[in-house]
Amino acid sequence: MNQQLVSAVSLAFAAAYGQAPRCLVQAPGRVNLIGDHTDYNDGFVLPCAIDCGTVIAVSPRTDMRVRVLATDYPGESDEFQLDQPIVFRADALWPNYVRGVVKFLLAHGLPLCGADLALTGDIPQGAGLSSSASLEVALAQAFKSMQGFDHLRPADMALIGQRAENHFVGCNCGIMDQLISACGVADKALLIDCRSLQTTPVDMPEDVTIMIVHSRVKRGLVDSEYNTRRMQCETAARHFGIQALRDLDLQTLEARAGELDPLVYRRARHVVTENQRTLDAAAALAVGDLPQVGRLMAQAHESIRHDFETSVPAVDQLVHILQAAIGDAGGARMTGGGFGGCVVAIMPNAIVAEVRATVLRDYRSPSGEPGIVYLCKASDGAGPLN
């Protein structure tokens, strides 16, 4: 974890509250190598936690008050009581993640005490790297570490974060982002079954780099379009009388395609084929078959582009530049919710410098800006820092 973040949040805590924090905790962001829009369909995903995230400094109070400041929003703070109804703040967004997590920690039956918190992070917001899930899981970890809730499992923290985002913040997300932030393993991707929440570590080859390139296209329409896609998937599942599209095979879908609205059919086809691609990619990654991983990533991007329609032209251009630069040595595709944001690429270390230079030379966003390149490594999930 970035030591500058740790120092900054510790100093901010001491300046605001007049003492050093009792605990420091972190929770990482994530990048999903393959398996987009499958998590809320009970399917499979293959993310890894990355080496940027949220850091929280926390100390207990003797009353029921929660005070929180965010160093990334100078001058902004929040305060509420644990023994009074925790309500949504319409005038600011970030405090609602704090309030939502605290509300669902209480609903989980945990006897919370008051707390002073300071939080910061280095995940670029709006990039599709799960800054919100990182914050939610870090908040759960802060109370766990501060109060010694050793029985609160990583999967519990993930579910609490998801419930906060679904039912308090109001975004109908799946479980992947919170689960990988809570359960990540250094140097491994995690194949996650989003129905059972079973996680299977998949070794990342030692000589491989994960490159994330921010398109500099601000992700617009994300919440409304995301919720629309989710409803379309649920419509398809209801038509087939199944719990989720996880339970549908491609042969059945294609045989009965005429029964569905063409748009709903394409949405379902993406999910069904993406689930299989994700399982195949995990198997290929485990044996170091990067050319096969690259082929599957290319198929996944085409499916997102044509069937799920969550890509945009600038992101397609960025994917094309990366795919051409990497060749059959790896792959690239859009990652995250879509409508802008980031592209993920995987490649041998030996070509990273050349690929990075090509991207910075050849890509410009619609506003004329170059992409922002991040070189990441698979990292551990949430935990204490001291």
Image (cartoon, grey):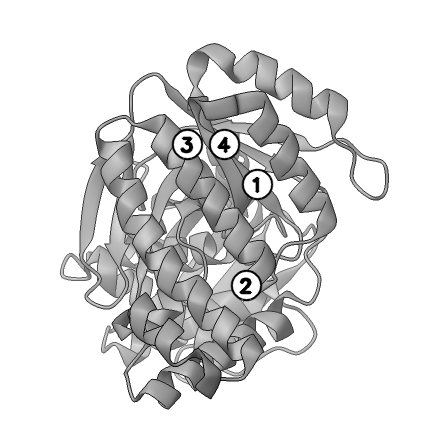
Q: For this view, does 109 lie left or right of residue 362?
A: left
Disc on the earlier residue, 4 or 1:
4
Q: What residue is pinned by disc 4?
A: 7
Asked if one can make out residue 85 in the rendered structure from this viewpoint, the answer is no
Pointer 3 residue: 1
Q: Earlier in the sequence, mark 2 or mark 3?
A: 3
Give 203 or 161, whichever is nearer the viewer.
203
Foreground pick, 99 / 378:
378
The residue indicated by pointer 2 is 307
Spatial CA distance of label 3 from label 1 is: 23 Å
Q: Earlier in the sequence, mark 4 or mark 2?
A: 4
Residue type at mark 3 is Met
Check disc 1 and give the amino acid type. Answer: Val
Q: Residues within 10 Å of mark 4 (few under 14, many from 20)?
A: few
Q: Is residue 225 left or right of residue 335?
A: right
Cα gap from disc 2 to disc 3, whole angstroms? 38 Å
SS at mark 4 in the image: helix
Mark toward the viewer: 2 or 3: 2
Secondary structure found at label 2: helix
> x, y percentage for residue 25?
36, 45
Going by the numbered disc 2, the residue's amino acid type is Asp
